[in-house]
Image: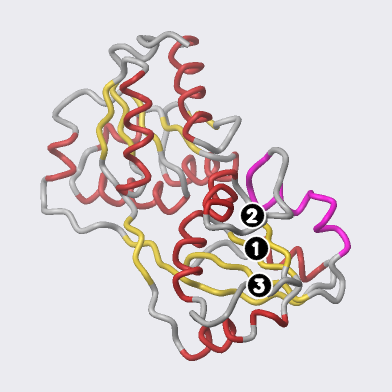
């Protein structure tokens, strides 16, 4: 891969701050210019009585699903200090990064997609087909999608959500977003529908209409459709793989075909 293949390309990266740094570095390694402007901030959720009770009863579940790397970080921090991970509770993850964080912490990930690192990809694994009578806990951020739990329930499982963090729009001073557009932005990267929504809200609040015509990299066809219905009229580029590497490959493919 040429180190200058993204030369003269300015990319607006909207991932949460720490998660965006690695992607920005990769863009610049390929000769591009990255503008790091996080549109989602990850914040801890203090455990309420219900969550604490659920975590204390972790051994009663059969499968624990971790939606994201953030879910791992905030969930493990909330587990009772005296309790080891119950041996009977099988661990599942959706993405490679999520699995890597779990494995780095010493946990065995037994169920994960081979491709399509989404809820749908996890649901397609053989281990998630016959779940009738199983109790499944889903570690996630507040307000996530319902499709995973609904499908598992339709297959006879009992599901419980454990919301361990929340996503919010970072606080910016008036004009900060406008300032980031003083340079020509060639393409934008968003990694969730919430990021797309926040991007549209900031563009409207600061009246930067060109945002809606700039090409947008998204993680799924579902996000692409959401972007279109939210008003984005430029190219919508869907990655083949949900990872930093997949985003870089999508940017290169788009740029070289442009």
Tell me what residue is drawn at x 67 percent, y 56 percent. 108
User: Which residue corresponds to mark 3?
Assistant: 137
Q: Position of residue 253 (x, y in %)?
A: 51, 16
Q: How crowded is mark 3: few (under 14 residues within 10 Å), some or many (20 or more)?
A: many
User: Which residue corresponds to mark 1?
Assistant: 65
Tell me what residue is drawn at x 59 percent, y 45 percent. 222
Q: Nearer the viewer, residue 67 or 81?
A: 81
Q: In which quarter of the image is residue 22?
A: top left
> Does 246 sit left or right of 155 as displayed?
left
Magenta residue span: 116-130
The secondary structure type at the circle numbered 2 is: strand
Q: Residues within 10 Å of mark 1 (few under 14, many from 20)?
A: many
Q: Distance between the residues labelled 1 and 3?
A: 6 Å
Q: Nearer the viewer, residue 174 or 3?
A: 3
Discs 1, 2 touching: Cβ within 8 Å: yes
Tell me what residue is drawn at x 47 percent, y 34 percent. 244
In the image, is residue 28 part of the stretch drawn in magenta? Answer: no
Q: Residue 157: which numbered mark, if any?
A: none
The secondary structure type at the circle numbered 3 is: strand
Q: How far apart are marks 1 and 2 (CA)?
A: 6 Å
Discs 1, 3 touching: Cβ within 8 Å: yes
Upstream in sequence: badge 1 or badge 3: 1
Q: Nearer the viewer, residue 90 or 10?
A: 90
Tell me what residue is drawn at x 37 percent, y 17 percent. 30
User: Which residue corresponds to mark 2?
Assistant: 93
């Amino acid at each position: 891969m040429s180190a200058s293949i993204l030369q003269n390309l300015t990319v607006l990266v909207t991932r949460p701050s720490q998660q965006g740094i690695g992607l920005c570095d990769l863009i610049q390694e390929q000769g591009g210019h990255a503008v790091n402007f996080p549109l989602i901030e990850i914040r801890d959720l203090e455990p309420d009585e219900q969550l604490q009770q659920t975590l204390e009863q972790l051994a009663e579940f059969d499968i624990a699903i971790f939606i994201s790397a953030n879910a791992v970080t905030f969930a493990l921090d909330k587990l009772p200090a005296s309790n080891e991970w119950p041996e009977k509770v099988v661990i599942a993850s959706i993405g490679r990064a999520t699995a890597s964080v779990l494995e780095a912490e010493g946990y065995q990930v037994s169920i994960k997609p081979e491709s399509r690192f989404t809820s749908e990809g996890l649901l397609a694994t053989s281990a998630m087909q016959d779940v009738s009578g199983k109790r499944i806990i889903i570690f996630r951020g507040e307000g996530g999608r319902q499709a995973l739990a609904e499908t598992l329930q339709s297959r006879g499982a009992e599901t419980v959500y454990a919301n361990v963090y929340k996503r919010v729009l970072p606080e910016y001073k008036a004009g900060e977003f406008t300032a980031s557009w003083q340079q020509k932005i060639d393409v934008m990267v968003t990694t969730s529908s919430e990021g797309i929504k926040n991007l549209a809200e900031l563009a409207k609040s600061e009246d930067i209409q060109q945002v809606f015509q700039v090409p947008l990299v998204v993680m799924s066809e579902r996000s692409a459709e959401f972007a279109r219905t939210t008003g984005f009229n430029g190219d919508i580029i869907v990655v083949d793989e949900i990872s930093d590497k997949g985003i870089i490959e999508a940017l290169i493919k788009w740029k070289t075909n442009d």
